Image (cartoon, helix red, strand yellow):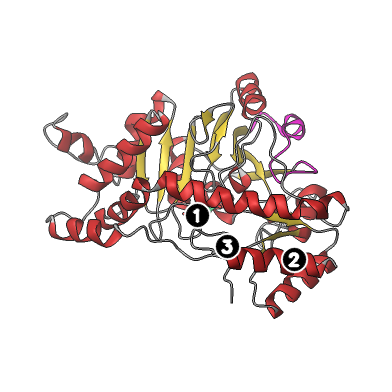
């Protein structure tokens, strides 16, 4: 079976884990946590980063930092993972879902303005498949109405909008290092604080509502409970694992993008014949090789393709179900249909893409997709 994903080990993970374990400090905010944070801050110029136990946690920190209260409205795509909404639902927010573009799962900024009310507080963008949303348009809207912007950059490591690194454009950003992402630590995430106003409080919320981090830096002479917070910082072992991946980031990205390009080039003819659609990368965006997908013409065609591939040992998978139609949020949603989101939920299928996918397996996958379409 050619799997959909296989977590990649660069070779140094066990070495750094060993160092972390025998360093005598395995709880959080030690040497490897700092090394990872420094890496992100120096490579991407992020103002302040904090390692978290997941992207879900980083998003929950965003909701706390933005002081979301019951009844506040948060605009976000429906074509996303549940964590994007849960983070705000946990604080009592009302989720207002915005539709995708017709040719790209990202939120169409033209559809956002009409959803803004005097209760709107935040726009959350999701850079689906690591492809940037139109951030100039989103930031303009946020400025015009005094809103905050959170980037759910879970899939968007090392990807750019007009030369700016994703995760570094909104007021806050969140990355994931779950084993299905480009660089991994099993579970793990990163909060990015781009707005100076949130830097100090982010560290306090991260450390269970205490000023412990400032104390260990020697900035204050005792530490205590100064705000609300929770346990968001990961053990050193998580950051040690991630550090090995960061040292190989360029190699990982090069390989993933090469696989993506091969799929695109070899399957382009299917789009030209109107049989499927391929991903659209707008001029302002880069591709980080996170996901390669096809958009089928119907749910029936997609189900048949997935079945056909599985019978031939190729594991392809669909992606998000619309959150506005979910069992949990359906009743709370305002009833608007979101046709583009629903279209991607029904028709999008992802093909195997991981570092160790061999040329042979890539060719088998491409040939099997081709033979399905005849
Ligand atoms: C993977 C993912 C998440 C969740 O990341 P975790 O690190 O597993 O919490 C959130 N949002 C999006 C868009 C994702 O792809």
Identify the mark nearer the N-term, 3 or 1: 1
The answer to whether residue 79 is magenta is no
Q: Is mark 1 within 8 Å of ligand 1?
A: yes
Stretch of the chain drawn in magenta: 101-119
Q: Nearer the viewer, residue 194 or 205?
A: 194
User: Could you give the CA–CA distance between mark 3 and mark 1, rounded to whole angstroms?
Assistant: 21 Å
Does label 2 or label 1 sit earlier along the sequence? 1
Q: Quadrant of residue 327?
A: bottom right
Q: Gap between marks 3 and 2, in whole Å?
A: 15 Å
Q: Is residue 65 above or below residue 259?
A: above
Q: Under tag 3, what secondary structure? A: helix
Q: Earlier in the sequence, mark 3 or mark 2?
A: 3
Q: Quadrant of residue 312?
A: bottom right
* Residue bearing the label numbered 2: 369
List the residue tagged with mark 1: 181
Depth check, front residue: 6 or 239:
6
Direction from residue 141 to residue 218 in the image, left or right: left
Query: Would you name the residue on which mark 3 appears?
Result: 359
Considering the numbered disc 2 on the image, is that residue within a helix, a strand or a loop?
Answer: helix
């Amino acid at each position: 079976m050619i799997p959909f994903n296989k977590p990649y080990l660069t070779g140094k993970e066990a070495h750094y884990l060993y160092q972390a374990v025998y360093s005598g400090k395995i709880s959080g905010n030690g040497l490897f946590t700092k090394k990872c944070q420094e890496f992100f801050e120096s490579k991407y110029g992020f103002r302040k980063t904090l390692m978290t136990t997941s992207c879900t946690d980083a998003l929950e920190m965003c909701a706390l930092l933005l002081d979301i209260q019951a009844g506040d409205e948060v605009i976000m795509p429906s074509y996303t993972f549940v964590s994007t909404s849960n983070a705000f639902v946990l604080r009592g927010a009302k989720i207002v879902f915005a539709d995708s573009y017709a040719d790209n799962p990202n939120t169409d900024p033209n559809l956002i303005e009409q959803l803004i009310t005097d209760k709107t507080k935040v726009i959350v963008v999701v850079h689906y498949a690591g492809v940037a949303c139109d951030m100039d348009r989103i930031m303009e809207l946020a400025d015009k109405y005094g809103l905050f912007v959170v980037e759910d950059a879970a899939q968007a490591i090392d990807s750019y909008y007009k030369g700016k690194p994703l995760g570094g454009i909104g007021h806050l950003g969140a990355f994931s290092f779950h084993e299905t992402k480009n660089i991994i630590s099993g579970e793990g995430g990163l909060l990015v604080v781009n707005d100076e106003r949130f830097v100090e409080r982010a560290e306090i919320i991260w450390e269970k509502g205490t000023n412990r981090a400032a104390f260990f830096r020697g900035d204050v002479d005792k530490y205590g409970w100064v705000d609300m917070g929770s346990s968001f910082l990961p053990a050193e072992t998580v950051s040690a694992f991630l550090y090995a991946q960061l040292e190989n980031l360029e190699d990982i990205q090069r390989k993933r993008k090469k696989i993506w390009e091969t799929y695109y080039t070899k399957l382009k003819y299917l789009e030209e014949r109107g049989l499927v659609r391929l991903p659209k990368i707008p001029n302002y965006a880069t591709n980080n090789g996170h996901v390669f997908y096809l958009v089928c013409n119907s749910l029936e065609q997609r189900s048949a393709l997935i079945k056909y591939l599985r019978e031939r040992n190729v594991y392809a998978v669909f992606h998000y179900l619309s959150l506005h139609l979910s069992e949990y949020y359906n009743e709370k949603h305002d009833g608007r249909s979101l046709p583009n989101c629903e279209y991607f939920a029904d028709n999008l299928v992802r093909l195997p893409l991981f570092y160790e996918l061999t040329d042979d397996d890539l060719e088998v996958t491409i040939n099997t997709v081709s033979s399905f379409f005849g």
